[in-house]
Image (tube, helix red, strand yellow):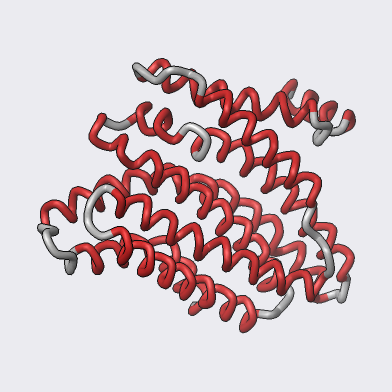
Amino acid sequence: MLYQLALNIVLQADVLVMQAVLTRTAGATLEAVKELIGVYKSVQSFAFLPYQLLIAVTFVLFPVVSKAAAEGDVETTRTMLRGALRFALLLLGAMLAVIAGVPEAVLRVVYRPEFYVGASALRWLALGQGAFALAVIGLTVILASKRVAAATWLMLTMLALVFVGDLAALSIAGFGERALSAAAIGTASGTTLGALVVFGYILRLYGSVLPWKTGLRSTAAALLGALAGSMVRLDSKLSAVAACAVAASVFVVALLLLGEVTASERAKLVRRFKR
């Protein structure tokens, strides 16, 4: 219960700290603070996508790892975790190529111009939520391995890091549009550091299970996708959709050219699509 409580507070810590800090900042009216928080919450709607989609991985991972832990089968746990992280890194790269790569285009698709100021915040917050999603996958394995206390302390550590990051960043930024990016950067800093702590613990438990090559390829492909998408001139909703499509398409092509997807995997994908 404590683990789940901490997890859910992590997702809203930035808004809580933003409201607390900005309402006490000189020159900030309650109405202006509400407007800023409204923009930030709109940014969150997209930034949460990496976490919301990748959380489905844990529904498959938990029962398998739990069974393996009960049987003392460490190798199955290692194999499942490595496979889950590889899948997560590929899906995460695809999402971040668009959400973090061309954030203004994403906002232009559904929001009015007054929300475009949140583009920089969306980039940082999406990266932070990506790190958080990977950490939750790792923590799911720790929970399934019957180390509930350890997982809870790790989540509480991440929560503390996010609060400290948000408080420091917002205190420096002060009131105004800069507060949007400050809250996102504070959150991203906390979740990234928290993820490093989580995987440091996993490294001690199971050894090296991170698919480093997949991570590097996915990152390179996402950067190429973001670069290509940013070259599209944004002057309408149609151009915003085009920028998102370009970023996603270049990511997929780059991933194939980098050799991440094997021939057997491509054949499986073709068979699935045919069905």
Residue 150 vs 83, above or below: the answer is below
Given the current orientation, which residue lies at the most extreme bottom position? 149
* Quarter of the image where the C terminus is located: top right
**Does residue 127 appear to the left or right of 268 in the view shown?**
left
Which residue shows up at 32% across the image and 63% down it?
Answer: 172
Residue 86, horizontal then vertical, whole percent: 75, 48
**Quadrant in the rendering for residue 260:** top right
183 over 49 or under it: above or below: below
- When asked about the image quadrant of residue 43, the answer is top left
Q: Position of residue 243 (x, y in %)?
A: 49, 22
Residue at 24 percent across and 63 percent down: it is 19
**Nearer to us in this view, 132 or 146:** 132
| Of 37 and 175, the residue lying toward us | 175
Residue 6: x and y, percent? 47, 73
Eyeballing the image, is 260 above or below 21?
above
Q: How many marks?
A: 0
Q: 257 above or below 191?
A: above
Q: Is residue 107 left or right of residue 86?
A: left
Image point (40%, 32%), residue name:
104
Please tell me which residue lies in front, 103 or 270: 103
52 sits to left or right of 94? left
Instruction: Name the residue at 30% across, 50% down.
Output: 178
